[in-house]
Image: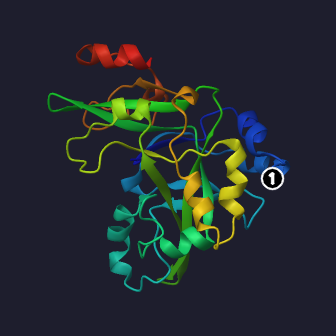
Amino acid sequence: MCYEARAFTAPKIKYVEQYGERLLDADKLLRRLEGVTPMYYASGFDHPDLPVITSYSDELQMFGWGLIPHWVNNSEGVVQIQNQTLNARAESIFEKPSFKDSVLKRRCLVILDGFFEYHHKNGKAFPYHIVRKDGLPMSLAGVWDTWQGEGMERKTVSIVTTRANHLMTRIHNNPKTSDGPRMPVILPREHETEWLRLDADDQEELKELLVPMDDELLEAYTVPRLKGKRSVGNTAAAISKHFYPELTTVQTGLF
């Protein structure tokens, strides 16, 4: 799954190297990055704004996490539906009412520096931070929509998930998950433009992009507690390495 994320913590030049000129206007990107607040740790259930790239703009935009379909007409149900649409399953995204219109017409890249997942052992959950080995930002496959209500307009996004690769299979072992280990779809550079610009008629080509990223391109390590009374919360400590004696075997294979 992907319910907790990190963004705007890498050096600005990393974003320019990855997206400037190719997908975004480099000067506008640098101006957008000036003064942004680093997000070392954020929970999707707080519905923070995430940085996204769409095919409709040459600027980095901020969309709320948790897609609100444009057809929702009950403002009281907005938060409830957002809690259910933080992620969109690749296997059902073309059929689910909340996503099927967006995946054909409104796809985006969600730009993160990393994300967090939990390993469960003996009734406890241990947080891992997953990043690219090359230190560049990640481009996660996303879908978005625009909702209008209560006299305002909100743009919101969901992150597409797929089956886990070997690395994430070792980490994501939540006993409450009935469909096995999951992970976000992290698009390699050569597939970013395809995800943004393929036509609605190219469903099979779109489905081919929704696969796990190669293990060799990612690394994972345990971090301090992110939730609860003794948590480090949204601070730089959230992405620092932390060793848990209970996980010696798992940690040794992932650090």
Residue ID at (41%, 72%): 96
Above/below status of 180 relative to 151: above
- Horizontally, residue 186 falls left or right of residue 229, namely right
Report if residue 54 is visible in the image: no
Residue ID at (75%, 45%): 19
Most foreground residue, 144 or 197: 197
- Horizontally, residue 250 falls left or right of residue 134, namely left
Task: Name which quarter of the figure residue 108 lies in.
Answer: bottom right
Task: Name which quarter of the figure residue 249 lies in.
Answer: top left
Q: Secondary structure at mark 1?
A: helix
User: Which residue type does callout 1 highlight?
Assistant: Lys
Most foreground residue, 33 or 199: 199
Most foreground residue, 73 or 38: 73
Pointer 1: residues within 10 angstroms few (<14), some, or many (20+)?
A: few
Task: Identify the residue position indicated by label 1 in the image.
Answer: 28
Model colouring: rainbow
Image quadrant containing the C terminus: top left
- Horizontally, residue 64 falls left or right of residue 167, namely right
- Horizontally, residue 27 falls left or right of residue 115, namely right
Residue 164, image x and y in percent? 41, 41
* Total numbered circles: 1
Above/below status of 81 relative to 216: below
Above/below status of 26 relative to 98: above
Residue 180, image x and y in percent? 30, 45
The residue furthest left is 122
Residue 20, image x and y in percent? 80, 46
Report if residue 18 is visible in the image: yes
Residue 58, image x and y in percent? 78, 59
